[in-house]
Amino acid sequence: MSATMQVSRRDFLRTGAAAGGLVLAVQLPGCGPRAAEKGEQGTASGAAKPVFEPNAFVRVGEDGAVTVVAKHLEMGQGTYTGLATIVAEELDADWSKVLVEGAPADASKYNNLLWGPAQGTGGSTAIANSWEQLRKAGATARAMLVAAAAQEWGVDAAGLTTDAGVVTDPKGGKRADYGSLAAKAAKLPVPENVPLKDPKSFKFIGKQSARVDTKAKSMGQAMFTQDVKLPGLLTAVVAHPPRFGATVKSFDASEAKKIKGVREVVQVPNGVAVLADSFWPAKQGRDLLKIEWDESKAFTQGSAEILAQYRELAAKPGIVARKDGDAEGTLAKAARTLEATYELPFLAHACMEPMNCVVRLSKDRIEVWNGEQFQTGDQGALAQAAGLKPEQVSITMLYAGGSFGRRANPKSDYLLEALSVAQAIKGSAPVKLVWTREDDMRAGQYRPLTLHYLKGAVDGSGKVTAWRQRIVGQSIIAGTAFEPVMVKDGIDVTSVEGAATTKYAIPNLQVELQSPALPVPVQWWRSVGNTHTAFAVECFIDELAAAVHKDPVAFRRGLLAGAPRHLGVLALAAEKAGWGTPLPAGRARGIAVHESFNSYVAEVAEVSLEGGKPRVHRVVCAVDCGIVVNPDVVRMQMESGIAYGLSAALFGEITLKEGRVEQGNFDRYQVLRISEMPKVEVYLVPSDAPPTGVGEPGTPPIAPAVANALFQLTGKRVRTLPIRV
């Protein structure tokens, strides 16, 4: 689709879509009608200038509009809706007057409380780390507005009530909306330790409400990186090396420069960049580049060779990540043992919006516009690369079209690439870096290829007496700024999470890790280590259950006696799925339960074979994520996680051949189609525990649930992903 056609379609959506729907408007900094063109910071659309800002998260305008400043990225997971709900609850706001604005990069105000002095979104932490913070922010603002009314009316604040953005004196019959009280409230001291609501009186939290970003996205008004326009802006695409570790030896850009609209061709550390007036001439120019690559240090192995090496490593002891009892001794003496090896491939993140970034460079400042996921890391990396201080780097956080971890790159790869292009042209123009889908898949970052070798022992009564698990896979943390904290005694905690942390009560349990170093770039992928550990653990549990002729649900119950929240979701999912009841001929059920990001999820998959290929008809999911802020968003994220995990289980695979990535687009990297999506039922476990993550925990159980169902159906074990039967 041409750039002209894209603009026309967006204009059509702005004016032609049906009116209606949402009670919550959304506007981001730098995203007003002309703010992105002028490079300005904007305020919430439709709101009067804020006159009351009691803290970094809440602003009240004289028209009563309440702006919630969101420190976390909205990349499709419903973060803005959840954060706004928490503030609106304690503030007793008028929901129709609540707006959401993305926070600037400023860790002193907007750090992720679970990460320490760093601002960013990831690890399913947005709601969990903001829960108490935003409740206090909203409650503080409410207390000050009530105090302002009490002062104006000369009454006791304790006798006043609030609802829907209005303070009321029940005795005196007076009412005042928040907007009329904002200026007076702004002059009052900010109170400390304001009491929070009793959850029994919640009006918004736990209730169904529409997502706040739906209208803007449906109407074509939401601002993504591709929508940013700045005076003189040039679009850049980069020709990356065909193999990891290769570099540019020489290049000829004579033909590329003949393309109308191409303005510059420059070498950058990651390849050769073509800059043009828009994407298409830049892409055409890149296609005409003649580049000679220096591959003397390039990686030339394929996936088959890597797996062969991993199998050799799995035959040897690794570094011990967890040791309970004497697994080795018990296995050596056991009358009956079982062994299995599980193999999982490299995976691409494959988010709908490939990597992109807008950078404007000046002598003493860097300005960035993008779907920003890791503000502090990117701010520091950009500043270091330019010889500036972090505070000289401003980042405007726009919407992102998905991420699944990709935009929070520990090495700030695509942002530094955008900066390198701007530096190569000496800051003469703002640069919009655009990666194509092929760039994203062939020059991106991957979920590591991983191998698990497990050996278990059972006694005559059918009890598991020993479990040894050897994990082989690249560390995603080694070589990053996180290594000092997240790699301990050679153990990358993200490599063993979900395995070394299992709650299955096995007296002799040992988990080991081998972390071979490869030049293939890897990083976290939705649910991180749990994405592969859950598959190995939950499939092997099923194998052990079958070996002792026990029902998979009953077998798990026996091993999870001391894990009540695991048992809760296991029982609920099994009940709602009709576990143990007859199914139509040719169908079978499989189950898996897993904890990740402090949430507990069990899933039952109902599967058949159609044309010799797996078909998932129904998935029943039970989730315990503490207090549910917005039930619909939780259900959406469970459905999303299941769809994402199914794509990986059934189709997902990045393969290398002689060091080259073989996949480039969705023709060879297949994802789940709408027609292949099963019916998904999500059930929420009532809880009074603080909220925990929902963006990632839905993904880990689906692959083992499907694999276990296929065994029930065919009698054959699935030990390699993607599934081939």
Image: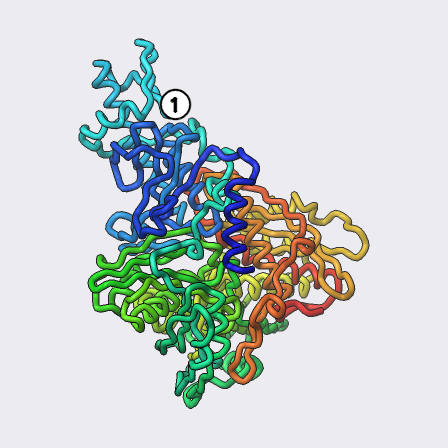
Colour scheme of the rendered structure: rainbow
Residue furthest to the top: 172
The quadrant the N terminus occupies is bottom right
Inspect the image, locate mark 1, and give the three-letter code of the amino acid beneath it.
Asp
Residue 49 in the figure: left or right of residue 81: left
Residue furthest to the bottom: 296
The quadrant the C terminus occupies is bottom right
Residue at position x 60%, y 48% in the image: 621
Horizontal and vertical percent position of residue 616? 69, 56
Q: Which one is nearer the viewer's eye here, 618 or 178?
A: 178
Q: How many marks?
A: 1
**Residue position for label 1:** 163
Disc 1 residue crowd, few under 14, some 14–19, many 20+, Cα 10 Å: some
Vertical relation: 232 (above or below) 63: below
- Is residue 333 visible in the rendered image? The answer is no
Look at the numbered disc 1 and give the secondary structure of its residue: strand
